[in-house]
Amino acid sequence: MTNRGDPITSSQSLDLRRTHLLDQASAWVSLHESELRRRAMEAARDKNAEVLWDLTAAYLTTLGQVGITLSPHTLRSYRTGVRQFLTHAEERAWNLLRPRRNDAAFWIASLTANTDAPQKKAASTVRSRVAAANALYAALRWAGATEAHPFEDVKQPRDRTDAISKRPPYRETTVHRALAAAERENRTDLRVLILLTAHAGLRIEEALTLTWKDIDAVNRRITVRGKGDKRRIVGMSGTLEDALRAHAGQGKDGRLFTFRYRSGAVYHLRRLMEAEGLTWAGFHAYRKFNGTLLYKRTRDFARVARHLGHSNVNTTRAYVEVPADDLASELADL
């Protein structure tokens, strides 16, 4: 599978996106400081969502923690958060550059209450929206438009239910039924996609950017480009190896799949699962299935973290479902 003609290099689509981001950032960075400040202040005065998001993206690209390697999913989340924050600021007549002392606390309370929906927003969603608003203010400070830190001392809601309990992994029977449905429908692409997430533990974005050149069938290894453009090597199960062999010769532009984006992958796999009478819980539920399975076999969070591409073992704990009676056998002889 490593010699399939002339596949595209390591994600031309990512290169194009990053070039676009750099071009956007360059338009701001090249401004004289006084002009940068003037434009930022004008956009803040008018609460111009397009310009303020453009400024925020430029800041994240040049000075953010991961810079240009920020994932498309994270960028979309930030953009949604900035837009929602600016809508609230417009409705509440915020002065963005000189916010009042309780403005930020009231917005967080409004997010938590989620008055426009039947139930309140999850604490993780609230934190995500506040992170986006914080990024906007960091960009405004970078431009010299304000010195405000409105969220600095404001408490955010904590989720008292652990993540794995709220969003558990797919059960083994669900994974097997989904695989069987894909095989029955002759959807070799969906069978491979399920196994890349459920057996290889890939994020959906990692799976979609794979090319046939990344597949080393001889050594049963896959080269994965993860968050922050970090690379790792993961092994493939015998089932995944067989599925890849059956799928060989398909895909588009050297990639494994004809769909390039998460939305396309969701559309096809969700339809397949729901037609089978299975509940769609997203791609992360497959990754959590993988994390739980590997921990059960290794009892080693560090090894599972390396496999999933987590830099922090504590992140991995949210991907592993540990039974309530996990230590029952160890306690039996006490």
Image (spheres, rainbow, N blue to C red):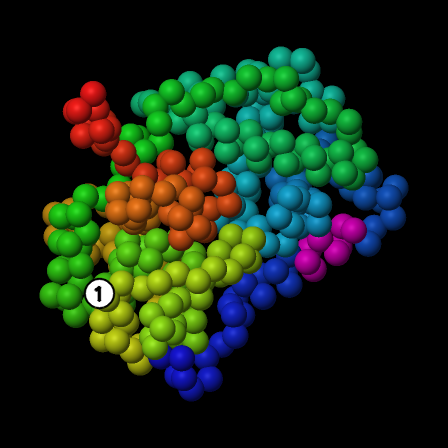
| Residue type of the residue flagged with mark 1 | Thr
Foreground residue among 41 and 273? 273
**Quadrant of the image occupied by residue 153:** top right
Foreground residue among 109 and 280? 280
Foreground residue among 280 and 245? 245
Foreground residue among 125 and 84? 125
Magenta stretch: helix, strand or loop mostly: helix
In the rendered image, the vertical position of residue 211 relative to residue 308, given as above or below: below
Q: What residue does disc 1 label?
A: 239
Residue for point 31% across, 80% down: 249
The answer to whether one can see residue 323 in this image is: yes
Query: Where is residue 172 shown, x and y percent of the image?
Result: 17, 47
Look at the numbered disc 1 and give the secondary structure of its residue: helix
Looking at the image, residue 241 sits to the left or right of residue 117; the answer is left
Residue for point 45% across, 39% down: 313
Residue for point 44% across, 66% down: 223
Looking at the image, residue 234 sits to the left or right of residue 14; the answer is left
Is 223 magenta? The answer is no
Q: Quadrant of the C terminus?
A: top left
In the rendered image, the vertical position of residue 267 relative to residue 136, given as above or below: below
Q: Which stretch appears magenta?
A: 22-29
**Quadrant of the image occupied by residue 261:** bottom left
Q: Quadrant of the N terminus?
A: bottom left
Query: Where is residue 55 shown, x and y percent of the image?
Result: 69, 44
Residue for point 47% across, 60% down: 232
In the displayed orientation, state which residue is furthest to the bottom: 5
In the rendered image, the vertical position of residue 67 relative to residue 243, given as above or below: above
Query: Where is residue 135 shown, x and y percent of the image?
Result: 63, 36
In the displayed orientation, state which residue is furthest to the front: 333
**Quadrant of the image occupied by residue 251:** bottom left
Query: Where is residue 11 shown, x and y percent of the image?
Result: 51, 68
